Amino acid sequence: MSDRITGKASYECSSCGAVHFLQSDDLNFDAECGSSREMGEEIQHVAEFEHKCQKCNNDIEIKFEVWEYPIGIINMTDSNVSGANVVSSDFEIYHEAPVDEYEQPIKLVKSLLQFRFDMFSEIFVDFWISSYKKAPKPTSIATVISLFIAIAGLWVSITALDNASKQKLEQTQSYSQQLKLLENTEQNLNDLSDFITAKKGEIEATKIMLKGLKTKKSELEPIVNANQKTVDAIFLQQRRELEEGIWAERGISFSLGILASLLASLIWHFVARFKKKED
């Protein structure tokens, strides 16, 4: 049997005389019956078309019949019409070229790597529809599983991003507390230095005590410097961690944006394809 019957026809409305034209996409032939003859099998292809006249809204019904005998040759054609008269018709047998099973997957991957989401969506919709026609049940199951995995992956990504943000917020609070403690320590040391300076006038008579206080002051200065280095090191480490976190968040946000664009493009092409088919 041939792959399909294709052709075109024109008809005239019996009510208003308006002429209408039918193209290959308007005629879907189905093989209804067949019988064995001397030169092989004879197959009857039938296409039914219902339409309202665009000019007078008259109901029109047309049934085209094409007999294929022998295989690959049109032997006879006929038509049954209600509400119109067939002006002309021309049908032929169309043989589809063999399809490379890897061609569409390669095109899908290539368009996705090139970030051409419109092309990817169009190819994917064609691939899904052809797969559904060949195997409806496995295609539906695979589609449901893929959607579940995509939704689960999206949920995991969002949850991980939220947890990372919370952890960074907690770390930031911890660093703030440490910084506050170091600032208090530094303030206390500064107050001690001021106290020593204020008491110099009172202990001028006792040089030994003054020398001891000066020695103590010289011992405290390295501690102050050491604390200052610790504060600087904490700030440096915090800045590095925040910079690393920013790039990670940007990468996740960019990936989520790409996925959202891809899903929106797929939904748009699915809606457009089924809307066109209904029309």
Image: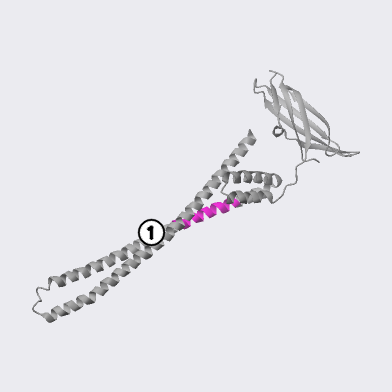
Disc 1 target residue: 169
Magenta part, dominant SS: helix
Q: Is 186 left or right of 74, judged from the image as shown?
A: left
Q: Is 272 left or right of 155, judged from the image as shown?
A: right
Q: Position of residue 120 (x, y in %)?
A: 60, 46
Viewer-nearest residue: 145 or 175: 175
**Which residue is farthest top?**
16
- Identified by mark 1, the residue type is Leu
Question: In the image, is residue 39 above or below residue 87?
Answer: below
Q: Residue at x 43, y 60 (%)?
A: 244
Q: Position of residue 109 (x, y in %)?
A: 62, 51
Is residue 143 visible from the viewing direction of this image?
A: no
Is residue 124 visible from the viewing direction of this image?
A: yes
Q: What range is drawn magenta here?
A: 146-162
Residue 1 appears in which quarter of the rendering? top right
Q: Is 33 left or right of 116, judged from the image as shown?
A: right
Q: Position of residue 70 (x, y in %)?
A: 86, 38
